[in-house]
Image: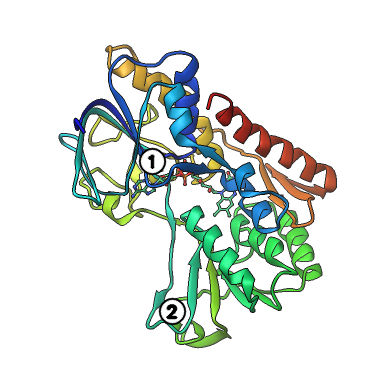
Amino acid sequence: MNADFDFLLAGGGHSHLGVLRQWASRDRPAGRIGLVSAEPHAWYSGMMPGLVAEHYQTRDCRVGLPKLCAAAEVEFIQGTLVALLPETPELLLATGETLRSTWLSLNLGSLPWLPEQTDDGMELLSVKPFADFIRRWQQWQEIPEAVGIVGGGAAGIELALAVAGRVPAIDLFCSDELLAGHPPRLRRLALRHLQDAKVHVHEHTPIQTVHGNTLIGEGQVRWRGRRLIVATGPSPLGWLRESGLRVDGRGFIEICPSLQSRSHPHVFASGDCASLPGAVHNGVHAVRQARVLATNLARVSIGQPLRHYHPQARSLALLADGQRGALLSWGGVAVEGRTLGDLKEHLDRRFVRRHSAES
Ligand SMILES: Cc1cc2nc3c(=O)[nH]c(=O)nc-3n(C[C@H](O)[C@H](O)[C@H](O)COP(=O)(O)OP(=O)(O)OC[C@H]3O[C@@H](n4cnc5c(N)ncnc54)[C@H](O)[C@@H]3O)c2cc1C
């Protein structure tokens, strides 16, 4: 394969889905464009808990990348990236192949932080990458056992509620209070749902280590079991943090409002792998950045002024309650109900449908 591109899109994240969708109908920049992704599908995170709860089928929750790429006249390259040289810029694949490009856009997501594990006495199941998570979760379901879940944010809570009833017991561990950063009422609503679902909630219980079949936090055994789901907050991909692009204190790529790297303007970054003041790491920002990214990639190559992404101060959070209802948080408000579950399903299905439509 000729390894030289005008544009390379690295990762099939939520932002790049929007870029492909826009370029399929308008604004596609001229030149050779490739998209590299470890998997041929982009998974829609908002539907993962519903998939675990068996409200959805696998095909409902993901977008086929090769077809969407074809619609935008973008070459799809399946491969796992292991290194980036930002000066050229050049991407190295696990196969040893190298890809070069004039302009590069990174939308590679993040991975949950994993507790240190001293041996293989407990199986750890990270919520990301989603394809691995779903495959191994289905294997676990063949012989259900008690599970621990680490992570008291929206993802950990939604997964606990989705898993409830499918395993004999669930213990949920959270380093702080549940849903820190959301309105206190949302936490109270979530706690009630978790209690009804018989999930044992352990707030203010940070976990550091997994030793044999024990979970250790602050030097004490917090839980014994053989299966642990890890849904902690996002941490950066190690190889990206080490690439030489300027990163923030946590290792996420620092970007300007134009979504360009602060150190290497010919590299763009969006979604979870990027760090922009005011944009917390969630799917909402990754989706919203798509339009600015699509426009800016097209403009930058012809020397036109770039648009800015302005993160909204508030973003809507809709948490699935595992029973086809949802909890909603917006600003300081938190409400719940079955109708909100219908709204969430409508919005989630619309996202997948819109990005599959061109495929
Ligand atoms: C269970 C769960 C539920 C969630 N629900 C919500 C929600 O309802 N609303 C919300 O706003 N947020 C939600 N989130 C958070 C959300 O998942 C992330 O913020 C969002 O996925 C970030 O999107 P992204 O575009 O940055 O990357 P992602 O959508 O994570 O995509 C990353 C892409 O990069 C590819 N990739 C990664 N590494 C490599 C590599 N080395 N080589 C090649 N390709 C690679 C992957 O295959 C993937 O295509 C949830 C998270 C979880 C875990």
Q: How far apart, in angstroms, are the residues tagged by discs 2 and 1? A: 31 Å
Residue receiving disc 2: 209
* Residue nearest the observer in this picture, 135 or 231: 135
**Are discs 2 and 1 less than 8 Å apart at CB?**
no
- Residue type at mark 1 is Gly
Name which residue lies at 63% across and 47% down: 47
- In which quarter of the view is residue 258 placed? top left
Look at discs 2 and 1 and give the one toward the viewer: 1
Res 320 visible = yes
Q: Is mark 2 within 8 Å of ligand 1?
A: no
Instruction: Give left or right: position of 45 versus 33.
Output: right
Measured as percent of width and height from the top left, residue 330 is found at 69, 41
- In which quarter of the view is residue 260 placed? top left
- Residue type at mark 2 is Thr
Q: Callout 2: few (<14), some (14-19), or many (20+) C-alpha neighbours within 10 Å?
A: some
Residue receiving disc 1: 11
Image height of 109 relative to 223, above or below: above
Measured as percent of width and height from the top left, residue 71 is found at 46, 22
